[in-house]
Image (cartoon, rainbow, N blue to C red):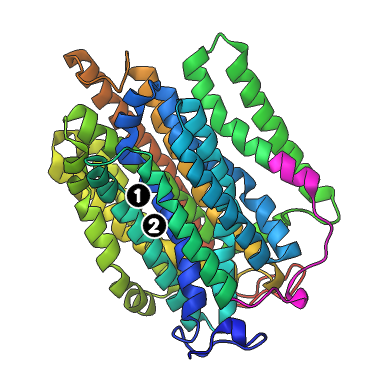
Amino acid sequence: MNETAADRPGRTPRSLREAWVALAGLSAVFLFEMLDNSILNVALPVIGRELHASTTALQWVTGAYAVVFGGLMLAFGAIADRFGRRRIMLIGLVLLGLASLATALVATAGQLIAVRAAMGAAAAMTTPGSMALAFRLFDEDGPRLRALTLISTVGLVGLAIGPTAGGLVLAIVPWQVLLLVNVPVAVLAFLGVRSGIAADDPAGLHRDTLDVPGMLLGTAAIVFALLAPTLFVDEGAGSWAPWAATAAAAVTAIGFVLRERLTRHPLLDLRLLALPLVSSGLAYKAAAGLATAGLGYMVTLQLQLDWGWTPALAAIGMLPQVVVLVAGSAIVDPFVRRAGLDRAAWISAAAVVSGLAVYGLLGRFGYPWVAIALVLVAAGMRVVGVVAGLNVVRGLPANRTTIGTALVDTATEVTSGAGIAITGTILAALFTGDIATSQWSPRQTGEFHRAVTIAGLSLTIVAAALVGWGIARARYAAGDRAAVPVGDTVPQDA
């Protein structure tokens, strides 16, 4: 029988093969996150018709997951670093299984949004721990990079096949099956993590008091910030609701910053964000999340609602992305060795932004331009997902690895939610009538084209600004490798 990490507490695995049980479980966790982000997109028109969902409701079917995930990520990251990464992950996997089973009972858009929110909470409990535990399995960056590449490969395959598999499945079964598939994934992850990873070592956890007010303020700030744009469209600028949400977002964000600066044991020590390698990696991940979510949302609606493709045909139309994400695993390690971690990060982030720009400018002129955009974004995502995250985690104290991966995933999920919110808000503002209707008038088609162009270019500008900031911070890090430690020792290459 092969010896696993769980059989050898306190010892480091000597190879990926030796840690295969743990990596299988952690890969299944990441598969859930990425599959859940993509698999419902292709079913949005069907869900809209069956549940009589408005444009805003459809936006929140996908956005609720991202909002809850992003809002709770830091809180559960801190809880995991305090009470145990393995323990919190196992609890989250149980919640995931139960929430997925509840999909079978969904009858309204509101119920589906609630289920998606519960899944977001489960993801916040599990996903940061997957990268943190993988990082801590090994002592050197080489095997860490290969382990993270393996986990991200499984997850990105889920992201890639989600729309394709979803479109094909919809031809023969109800859309609810697309979420019920999470149940066996959760079971596989639970078994792999429980048997392949040793129980948490108390010496590797901190004993600081949990910053509950910081958790509440941080979560509220994110939720209000993503809710405000939708309310401006639904209620109008003359209503008090959108202005109240905007004010609440500003107040809670300011309150969070003040709380973290003044409290003795902050949820997030803001000095960590000032580390050049950390801020650079977070900027790249934020740009990638914004671009990927916005592009996926727009392409799905365009293929099915604008061009009239069936879900199965739309799934085939996503194949360029699938091919690049699956085949790209072979080039990550050689490319990173040749270019270096810092250069590989900004090149891949720039590719993601370029793909979004191609779609915003040319996507409405035919499928070849859509395919080029999908390829560029997929190629960039394949690298930046691993490299930027590794840069952030290796630049943080050893007993803050979960909060570090939570920072990475928060940047991705919050900007993913923002990408969907911005796109959905622009569509709702410019498109008259029900977007899920079977046939559009010429005027509605023109409105849709204008909306996706404006949304695509708006997201491109924001993503490009984030990449520019990331490049500037990475260059600063390269010129000043002696980063000031915060708390525990920070690696000198941070």
Residue 10 position by quadrant: bottom right
Q: Which residue is mark 1?
A: 353
Relative height, residue 135 to residue 408 (above, below): below
Q: Say which amino acid is labelled 2.
A: Ala
Residue 274 visible? The answer is no
Q: Is residue 81 left or right of residue 116?
A: right
Q: Which residue is mark 2?
A: 349
Q: How many marks?
A: 2
**Residue 215 within the magenta-colored segment of the rendering:** yes
Q: Name the quarter where the C terminus is drawn.
A: bottom right
**Residue 453 within the magenta-colored segment of the rendering:** no
Task: Between residue 461 and residue 247, name the one nearer to us.
Answer: 247
Query: Residue 340, percent across and down?
Result: 41, 75
Relative height, residue 326 to residue 443 (above, below): below
Residue displayed at 68% across by 27% down: 248
Contact (Cβ within 8 Å) of mark 2 with mark 1: yes
Residue displayed at 22% across by 48% down: 318
Q: Residues within 10 Å of mark 2 (few under 14, many from 20)?
A: many
Residue displayed at 27% across by 39% down: 299
Residue range of the region highlighted in magenta in the rendering:
197-218
Relative height, residue 231 to residue 482 (above, below): above
Relative height, residue 83 to residue 221 (above, below): below
Query: Residue 331, percent across and down?
Result: 29, 73
Task: Between residue 138 and residue 286, name the one nearer to us.
Answer: 138
Secondary structure at numbered mark 2: helix
Q: Say which amino acid is labelled 1.
A: Val
Q: Which mark is residue 361?
A: none
Secondary structure at numbered mark 1: helix
